[in-house]
């Protein structure tokens, strides 16, 4: 919910306005309190639309019809004035989530819940049809869940009160995916009647039972085509209710049951709702209800020389058309969560903005505390950067917990984040072991866990099915060999060898196989295993050199064992290309390898921002913020953490822009759809849930006992080609 604006009235017809729930081209929806203390969603229509005689006739007719609906399972009209200069309509306010939010949070609902839901919605529709009304937009977003049962909202008033185009010839009425075939065929819009609502109810039942839309998703045209011409996907609908759902979704309106017949099949709709909701949802509803009590009452305002309203985009008009649904659902969640101070416009009072918390669970005291520090510092700088933006729709806060890189310490911290409703996402651990120990907790709480410093094999986490809450914001780690492999190809080598360290488990096999696949067309690759229970790399190195290897890749995770491999290669007089992956770039590798590390190429997922032109401003801000000298290196993973926090903030901003509740599951889904250009790289996911921009592997070369950043693979290989060409030209 947003605070009232200067031009907003403080009261309308005895209703005290508390804040804005939504706004669109037709008007504004306010959260209001009646003289008796009841909360209401009050929609105020703009005067310019009320000047249309046809609009006022429709509004008057349907408002009066809606007032006659007194069924238990509808959001009742509390009052209306179609004759006012700015007509208004007030309905009951339900502080529960919408069915869409509930399914997003908890997945498909159990059959008993859906039976109770369907019976009550059918009862509500039966009452509406008896009053001569057709809803025309029955969908999950227009069904609110209360402790005693569901409530149907937005009974076609917003649809007819929305621009005349919404009911004009060649205009499609309803929401694709939940509308009837006769609604989709705009030429037959006059055929829309009670049977259309029954079709939509069938779609809602299928969605609640399966978590999926029966006619799929995608482009509007494709969904509409499937609705009109294809059969619904009901494979996951239980057999006990399948015949009813199928009947509701008949293409011919005459073949569908009536709303009252649907209610009769599903069971009693008039008795007490009882414990009809699955575990988790009653607590959410109770929490939201209790927060309503904390709403402030603004001081009365006076209207004087109100500014001309700004023109509204078509997108905002469409969003505003569903403002009544937003009013009862999650549109006010931003206000009801934690709140913090914001900044006002020039000369204006401070704005009150919602404050959302991002968690950081990382190693700040263990073996990888330096990487954990980089993540924390980068995340904090990102939050400060975001909160300094004048156009931000909310504020961010940070909550940090140190797991020491130890799974046993990490588990209770993850549980604490899971139970902390103020935390919407967590920036993640530094070790695969911590991820594996905690991912089930984060998945159970549908709390996004994003990592920049940890790579795992997705096959080892069965929870990563459906819509996983775990995000690796980095390339798959079995691609990190590309720093070595591409250099080998550019050098036109004929043979390469992979030292496959079995002490690294499956990673060594995946890394070796991926390198073999990458180089296979150009370079003959041999693989030489080293058993996990030995530190003797001699046999594997001798076999690799005997095979004529011109390049040697250490495929493993251990800095110490990589150092032993480097020493063995040097002891055998090998001076060719060597390489590995980012996990070996620890002090122990340099200590064990010594001079043998010189010249190694190492693939990483992180950049050196000080040597990345696009990160120049970040580097300066980071050094200033943390009191570092102008030449001090920036902590590893800091810029990646900075990017990821701002990517999460961008996903949150898009939810707010679309009028959706700032809920964990909604954020998880939005992150899966996000493409974000950060300072270090571009971030995004494909349909297989893998990081989309997998080519962004970065290259470091060991020079004078330290890792020197060369840029991404493309830049490093271009430099290698240029160097070889120069060498050939000079005859070297």
Image (spheres, helix red, strand yellow):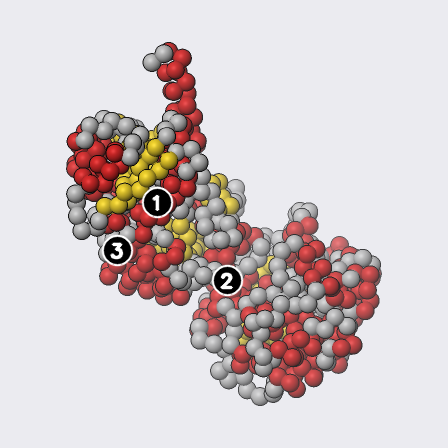
**Label placed on residue 333:** 2
Q: Which residue is mark 3?
A: 403
For marks 1 and 2 on the same chain, the one whose residue lies earlier in the sequence: 2
- Marks 3/2 in contact by CB < 8 Å: the verdict is no
Compare residues 140 and 529 and report the one nearer the observer: 529
- SS at circle 1: helix
Q: Is residue 277 left or right of residue 491?
A: right
Task: Give how far across and how far down residue 35 sits, in percent.
Answer: 59, 73
Compare residues 278 and 158 and report the one nearer the observer: 278
Taking the spot 31% from the left edge, 52% from the top edge, the residue there is 506
Count of numbered badges drawn on the protein:
3
Compare residues 571 and 94 and report the one nearer the observer: 571
**Which numbered disc, 1 or 3, marks the residue closer to the eye?**
1
Position of 260 relative to 510 (above/below): below
How far is mark 1 from mark 2, CA to CA? 45 Å
For marks 1 and 3 on the same chain, the one whose residue lies earlier in the sequence: 3
**Label placed on residue 511:** 1
- SS at circle 3: loop
How far is mark 3 from mark 2, CA to CA? 31 Å
Task: Indicate the quadrant where residue 159 lies.
Answer: bottom right
Taking the spot 34% from the left edge, 44% from the top edge, the residue there is 512
């Amino acid at each position: 919910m947003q605070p009232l604006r200067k031009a907003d009235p403080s009261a309308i017809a005895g209703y005290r306005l508390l804040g804005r729930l939504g706004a669109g081209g037709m008007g504004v929806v306010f959260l209001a309190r009646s003289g008796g203390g009841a909360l209401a969603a009050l929609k105020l229509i703009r005067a310019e639309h009320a000047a249309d005689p046809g609009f006022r006739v429709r509004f008057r007719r349907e408002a009066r019809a809606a007032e006659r609906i007194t069924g238990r399972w509808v959001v009742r009209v509390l009052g209306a004035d179609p004759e006012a200069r700015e007509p208004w309509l007030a309905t009951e306010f339900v502080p529960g989530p919408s069915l869409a939010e509930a399914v997003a949070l908890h997945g498909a609902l159990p059959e008993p819940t859906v039976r109770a839901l369907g019976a009550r919605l059918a009862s509500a529709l039966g009452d509406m049809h008896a009053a001569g009304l057709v809803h025309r937009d029955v969908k999950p977003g227009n069904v609110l869940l209360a402790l005693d049962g569901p409530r149907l909202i937005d009974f076609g008033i917003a649809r007819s009160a929305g621009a005349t185009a919404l009911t004009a010839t060649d205009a499609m009425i309803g929401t694709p995916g939940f509308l009837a075939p006769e609604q989709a065929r705009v030429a037959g819009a006059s055929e829309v009647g009670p049977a259309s609502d029954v079709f939509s109810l069938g779609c809602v039942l299928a969605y609640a039972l399966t978590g999926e839309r029966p006619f799929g998703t995608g482009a509007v045209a494709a969904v509409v085509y499937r609705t009109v011409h294809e059969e619904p996907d009901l494979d996951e609908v239980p057999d006990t209710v399948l015949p009813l759902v199928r009947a509701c979704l008949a293409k011919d309106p005459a073949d569908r049951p009536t709303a009252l017949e649907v209610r009769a099949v599903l069971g009693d709709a008039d008795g007490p709702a009882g414990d009809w909701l699955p575990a988790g949802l009653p607590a959410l509803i109770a929490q939201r209800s209790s927060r309503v009590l904390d709403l402030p009452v603004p001081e009365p305002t006076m209207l004087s020389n109100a500014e001309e309203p700004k023109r509204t985009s078509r997108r905002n008009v469409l969003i505003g058309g569903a403002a009544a649904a937003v009013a009862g659902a999650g549109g006010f969640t931003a206000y009801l969560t934690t709140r913090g101070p914001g900044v006002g416009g020039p000369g204006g009072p401070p704005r009150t903005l919602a404050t959302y918390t991002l968690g950081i669970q990382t190693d700040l005291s263990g073996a990888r505390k330096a990487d954990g520090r980089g993540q924390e510092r980068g995340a904090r700088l990102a939050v400060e950067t975001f909160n300094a933006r004048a156009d931000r729709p909310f504020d961010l806060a940070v909550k940090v917990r140190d797991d020491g890189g130890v799974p046993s310490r990490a588990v209770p911290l993850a549980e604490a984040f899971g139970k902390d409703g103020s935390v919407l996402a967590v920036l993640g651990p530094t070790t695969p072991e911590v991820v594996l120990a905690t991912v089930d907790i984060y998945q159970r709480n549908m709390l996004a866990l994003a990592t920049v410093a940890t790579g795992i094999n997705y096959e080892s986490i069965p929870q990563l099915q459906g819509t996983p809450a775990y995000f690796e914001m980095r390339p798959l780690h079995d691609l990190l060999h590309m720093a070595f492999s591409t250099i080998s190809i550019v050098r036109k080598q004929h043979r390469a060898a992979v030292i496959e360290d079995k002490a690294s488990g499956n990673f060594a096999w995946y890394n070796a196989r991926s390198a073999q696949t990458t180089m296979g067309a150009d370079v003959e690759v041999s693989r030489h295993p080293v058993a996990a229970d030995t530190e003797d790399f001699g046999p594997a190195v001798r076999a690799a050199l005997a095979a004529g290897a011109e390049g040697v890749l250490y495929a493993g995770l251990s800095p110490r064992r990589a150092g032993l491999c480097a020493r063995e290669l040097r002891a055998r007089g090998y001076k060719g290309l060597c390489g590995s992956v980012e996990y070996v770039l620890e002090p122990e590798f340099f200590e064990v390898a010594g001079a043998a590390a010189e010249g190694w190429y190492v693939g990483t997922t992180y950049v050196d921002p000080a040597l990345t032109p696009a990160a120049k401003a970040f580097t300066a801000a980071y050094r200033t913020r943390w009191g570092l000298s102008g030449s001090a290196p920036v902590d590893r993973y800091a810029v990646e953490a900075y990017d990821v926090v701002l990517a999460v903030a961008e996903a949150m901003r898009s939810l707010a822009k679309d009028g959706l509740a700032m809920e964990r599951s909604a954020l998880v889904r939005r992150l899966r759809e996000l493409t974000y250009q950060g300072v270090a790289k571009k971030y995004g996911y494909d349909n297989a849930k893998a990081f989309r921009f997998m080519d962004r592997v970065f290259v470091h070369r060991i020079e004078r006992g330290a890792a020197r950043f060369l840029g991404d693979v493309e830049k490093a290989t271009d430099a290698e080609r240029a160097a070889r060409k120069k060498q050939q030209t000079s005859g070297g």
